[in-house]
């Protein structure tokens, strides 16, 4: 059993407190931290959290609890200072994506975690679903041979979904696409080397910045990936992980994942089609700890055993996904010029 504290009890943090943490039996909560009396009162009133477990500062919680894991569920701009302090205090850390706003900050936290001998994990929850887990294994085992071309489409329509970030810079690339960028690296088992990206804001859009974009991404083993994403698409919505078509030397892999929204839910779907043969839908094994429960259970296991599982989204690993975000924004600002990932990673 890993003892943990949670820092950040706001809107998304409360969701962790209510819907995620109680389902991960390897974690024992010994503290909750937030500077807001309203947020603290909510977890006490609605979730029955003992007031003795609630603190107004991280340092106070560190003095009065024996936790070894910090669950950081704060707004993005607070990730860097809070995670840094957690590591300085000797905690292992799991933090929501994106774990920093700059590559330099990310590198600093990764180095600090290594110096402290602690685990730093980014909660890339889309990895913990039946579809991408199965596809990553198929590709790692050479199903259909060398990967050639990948197409990924993400379609949603913001105004009909209560999307709140109308004033957020880069609402597609910075807020949503990191999930897709991270899945690209995880599923392909490969790293990107360069990309070209264009973004735009459709007529009549309530967004102040660009909610739509296209990118071409080249990976180190030669795979070319075409990415199209939009918060302002009037077509049929895709699952949150998007719709994937992956062409390899000897066949095609098609899949989608996280097909849910509000009162709608559907399973992950995986279809295999060898060249010149019929397509076959593959049955997917359920995941015991899906989505965010999967990320929390994963770091609890690492803290407990010291064993790093396949696909573990460490801070070091996640620098590659953060670099794709930064590179795509940079390319779009340059009118679609190619950007080398190494330029971003420095």
Image: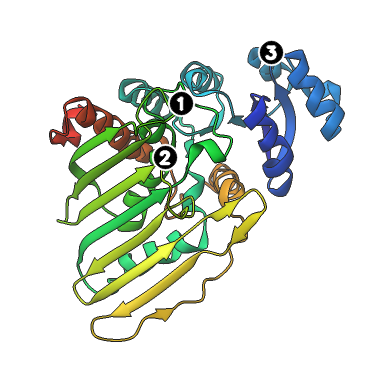
Q: Quadrant of the rendered structure where residue 144 is? A: bottom left
Mark closer to the observer (1, 3): 3
**For numbered disc 3, what is the local secondary structure?**
loop
Residue 251, compared with residue 159, is above or below; it is: below
Residue at the spot x=37%, y=28% of the render? 170
Check disc 3 and report the residue beneath it.
35
> Do tag 2 and tag 1 residues touch (Cβ < 8 Å)?
no
In whole angstroms, how far apart are the C-alphas of marks 2 and 3? Answer: 36 Å
Mark closer to the observer (2, 3): 2
Q: Quadrant of the rendered structure where residue 260 is? A: bottom right
For mark 3, does the 10 Å Cα neighbourhood hold few (<14), some (14 to 19), or many (20 or more) residues? some
Residue 37 placement (x, y as % from top left): 77, 14
In whole angstroms, how far apart are the C-alphas of marks 1 and 3? Answer: 26 Å
Residue 5 placement (x, y as % from top left): 67, 29
Residue at the spot x=66%, y=37% of the render? 16
Mark closer to the observer (2, 1): 2
**For numbered disc 2, what is the local secondary structure?**
loop
* In the foreground, 29 or 323: 323
In whole angstroms, how far apart are the C-alphas of marks 2 and 1? Answer: 44 Å
* In the foreground, 344 or 267: 267
Check disc 1 and report the residue beneath it.
116
Q: Which mark is residue 232?
A: 2
Residue 73, compared with residue 184, is above or below; it is: above
Residue at the spot x=77%, y=20% of the render? 40
Is residue 298 in sight in this rendering?
yes
Quadrant for the N terminus in the image: top right
Residue 155, compared with residue 115, is above or below; it is: below
**For numbered disc 1, what is the local secondary structure?**
helix
């Amino acid at each position: 059993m890993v003892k943990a504290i949670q820092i950040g009890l706001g809107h998304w943090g409360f969701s962790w407190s209510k819907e995620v943490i109680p389902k991960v039996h390897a974690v024992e909560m010994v503290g909750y931290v937030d500077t807001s009396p309203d947020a603290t009162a909510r977890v006490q009133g609605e979730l029955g959290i003992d007031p003795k477990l609630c603190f107004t500062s991280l340092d106070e919680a560190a003095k009065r609890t024996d936790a070894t894991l910090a669950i950081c569920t704060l707004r993005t701009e607070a990730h860097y200072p809070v995670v840094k302090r957690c590591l300085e205090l000797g905690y292992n850390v799991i933090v929501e994506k994106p774990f920093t706003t700059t590559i330099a900050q990310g590198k600093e936290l990764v180095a600090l975690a290594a110096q402290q001998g602690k685990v730093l994990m980014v909660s890339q929850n889309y990895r913990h679903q039946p579809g991408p887990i199965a596809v990553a294994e198929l590709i790692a085992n050479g199903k259909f041979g060398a990967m050639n071309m990948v197409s990924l489409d993400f379609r949603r329509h913001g105004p009909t979904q209560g999307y709140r970030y109308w004033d957020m810079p880069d609402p597609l690339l910075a807020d949503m696409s990191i999930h897709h960028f991270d899945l690209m690296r995880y599923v392909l088992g490969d790293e990107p080397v360069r990309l070209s990206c264009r973004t735009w804001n459709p007529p009549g859009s309530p967004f102040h910045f660009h909610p739509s974009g296209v990118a071409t991404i080249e990976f180190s083993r030669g795979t070319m990936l075409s990415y199209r994403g939009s918060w302002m698409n009037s077509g049929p919505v895709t699952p949150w992980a998007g719709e994937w078509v992956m062409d390899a030397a000897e066949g095609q892999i098609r899949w989608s994942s996280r097909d849910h929204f509000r009162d709608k839910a559907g399973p992950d779907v995986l279809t295999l089609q060898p060249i010149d043969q019929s397509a076959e839908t593959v049955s997917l094994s359920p995941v015991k700890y899906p989505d965010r429960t999967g990320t929390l259970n994963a770091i609890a296991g690492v803290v407990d055993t010291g064993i790093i599982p396949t696909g573990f989204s460490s801070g070091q690993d996640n620098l590659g996904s953060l670099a794709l975000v930064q590179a795509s924004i940079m390319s779009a600002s340059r009118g679609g010029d190619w950007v080398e990932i190494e330029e971003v990673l420095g």
